[in-house]
Image (cartoon, grey):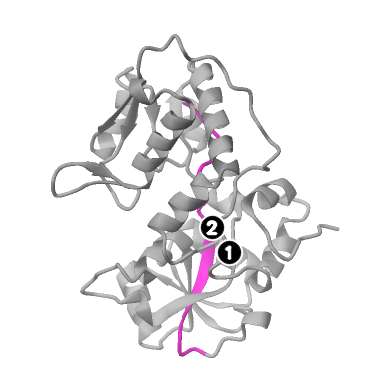
Amino acid sequence: MCKTPNHITLPQIFKIWSKACFVFVILLAGSMFSAHAAPPHLEGDNQKPAKPDISQRSEIRFLTGTDFAPFNSLTPQGRLSGYNIDLIRAICQELSITNRCQIEARPWNELLPALRNNEADALVAGLVPDREKRTSFSFTRAYFSLPARFVATKKEQINIASFSPDDKSVGVLAGTAHEALLKTYFPKAKITPYKSSELLYKDLQDGKIQLIFGDAMSLSLWMSPAATSDNSNGACCNFVGGSYPAPEFLSQGMAIALRKQDTDLRLAFNNALSALERKGVLDDLYLRYFPVGFY
């Protein structure tokens, strides 16, 4: 039997989530998670990877993107800002290499080629490892998970304690992993695939569907008080039920990409990420950039 505690953090999720109990946990998750739960952790606090010596490296070149807010973007003054930028600085400080760290931003389509051509040592740009990327690069442990969640309008009468999407009309983006997850684990939901987020949001607001199921991070940004859009206003809505990590469908999350030969850097970054997790720095970054919590 897979036992799940009342308050689940990401290290617990990653430890207990296995194929044997995955279906059982995901069906119960809706009644156990809070829409504003504390940010999750990606590893247990007792896991302290070895700290390799990288003192021989005269510089460490980090590469990130320019247009993936709130993870990385350029201010009107041309300065880099965002979650990934603050994460890089925190890693450098944790490893006591701030004076050797360089951060450069490039367009998305130039990032992987630059790393492959030795123009950078590490890529921190919201990259989600997949089988194809792992053939060419190595990756650290995940630093940011991307679960799925349900959203309803605030006027929708939802019983949080016994939430279930069964027999409810649920919109989801067509052809996505979220649609596959929804059909697999919630077959009794009345599922409607949509071609665009704009149409999906509008139909929820207009009452044509009762729920949205999708990427919790994107939905969080849509519902953020700071979000501005001519086509939608997420202030109408909130999360219902729990978060669904579902790594079989949604991957383990964002990770730092490196060249395969740079084992020392991968181990050093893993060490730093675990330390930042224990110290609460990753929690602070999450809450700074995502006021509408989605775990």
Q: Position of residue 25 (x, y in %)?
A: 72, 62
| Residue bounds of the magenta highlight | 137-156
Q: 292 above or below 123?
A: below
Q: Tag on residue 278? A: none
Q: Position of residue 133 (x, y in %)?
A: 46, 32
Question: Is 84 one of the magenta-colored residues?
Answer: no
Q: Which amino acid type is marked by label 1?
A: Ser
Figure quadrant of residue 198: bottom left
Count the marks: how many?
2
Q: Tag on residue 147? A: 2
Gap in angstroms between the C-alphas marked 1 and 2: 6 Å
Figure quadrant of residue 23: bottom right
Identify residue for label 1. 243
Q: Residue at x 58, y 54 (%)?
A: 40
Q: Residue at x 67, y 81 (%)?
A: 161
Q: Position of residue 248 (x, y in %)?
A: 61, 50
Figure quadrant of residue 197: bottom left
Q: Residue at x 13, y 45 (%)?
A: 77
Q: Which amino acid type is marked by label 2?
A: Pro
* Left or right: where 83 falls relative to 179: left
Whichever of labels 1 and 2 marks the residue nearer the N terminus, that label is 2
Kindly check if marks 1 and 2 are in contact, taking CB atoms under 8 A apart as contact: yes
Q: Farthest residue toward the top? A: 56
User: Is residue 92 at all visible to an observer of this figure?
Assistant: yes
Q: Nearer the viewer, residue 233 or 174?
A: 233
Rate crowding at label 1 as few (under 14), some (14 to 19) or many (20 or more) other CA atoms within 10 Å: many
Question: Is 153 one of the magenta-colored residues?
Answer: yes
